[in-house]
Image: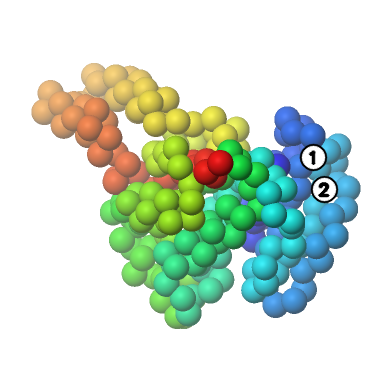
Amino acid sequence: MLELYLQDHGRVVDGEWPARQVVSCRLVGGDRGSPVTTPMIGRLHGCEASYDEPLPFTAASFDLVILHHTLDDLAAALPQRPPRQVAEEWLARIASILRPGGVVAGCGRNGSSPRGWHWRRRAVPSGSSEVAALSVLSCQGALLSAGFRGIQVCNLWPDPQAPSTLAAVEVEASRRAFRYALESSRDSLSRSGYLLRKAVVELGLNRFLEPHLFYWGCRSC
């Protein structure tokens, strides 16, 4: 499996990840990348690659690619281009290095959320460290355009920073977690407040409200 990241907060895998080989690749600007992988810990290997150049991996060479805020960080690093365009291009690149049936899994800021409106306003040529590359609907569209199927877009609960959730969350599990959180706080809510929140959860509208989203897609065979 492969993880791609720009900032340290994007590193989530370690030598204990259950895969025969794990490559942790930092994306850098210009031509400073070095595609040669070097051993780090256990099965974990590290390398660098330029985000201005094609990925230095052969076609169909990975079963899983992890993107932990990677698309947001790429959009912030390339402020002269629309964030969604950056995300779509990179998902297409990733599809090319996944084996048929391979999976991309990641999380990012939710451009659909009220907080996401603020992030989108900050995505201007001056550059920002906080960019929401995708909304719920544009995330689904970008994955479809890149050739992914079996797409899921939901919210991470309880912690979008927990790396173990990246390859394990699915829509119904996410909804169960939100139901549990709602019932735990029921005594502190008015009846109308509880019913409103319950409707939001059951209809899946929390996808458009929570500040982070999770996406998962399978490359077509």
- Asked if marks 2 and 1 touch (Cβ < 8 Å), the reply is yes
Q: Amino acid at mark 2?
A: His
Q: Position of residue 2 (x, y in %)?
A: 69, 47
Colouring scheme applied when the structure was drawn: rainbow
Residue at the front extreme of this rendering: 221
Q: Tell me the residue that label 1 is attached to.
A: 21
Give the Cα distance between marks 2 and 1. 8 Å
Provide the secondary structure element on which disc 2 rests.
strand
Write the residue at 69% across / 54% down: 59
Count of marks overlaid on the render = 2
- Using residue 182 as the reference point, say whether residue 145 is left or right of it: right
Q: Amino acid at mark 1?
A: Gln
Q: Position of residue 153 (x, y in %)?
A: 40, 41
Q: Tell me the residue that label 2 is attached to.
A: 45
Q: Residues within 10 Å of mark 2 (few under 14, many from 20)?
A: some
- Using residue 53 as the reference point, say whether residue 109 is left or right of it: left
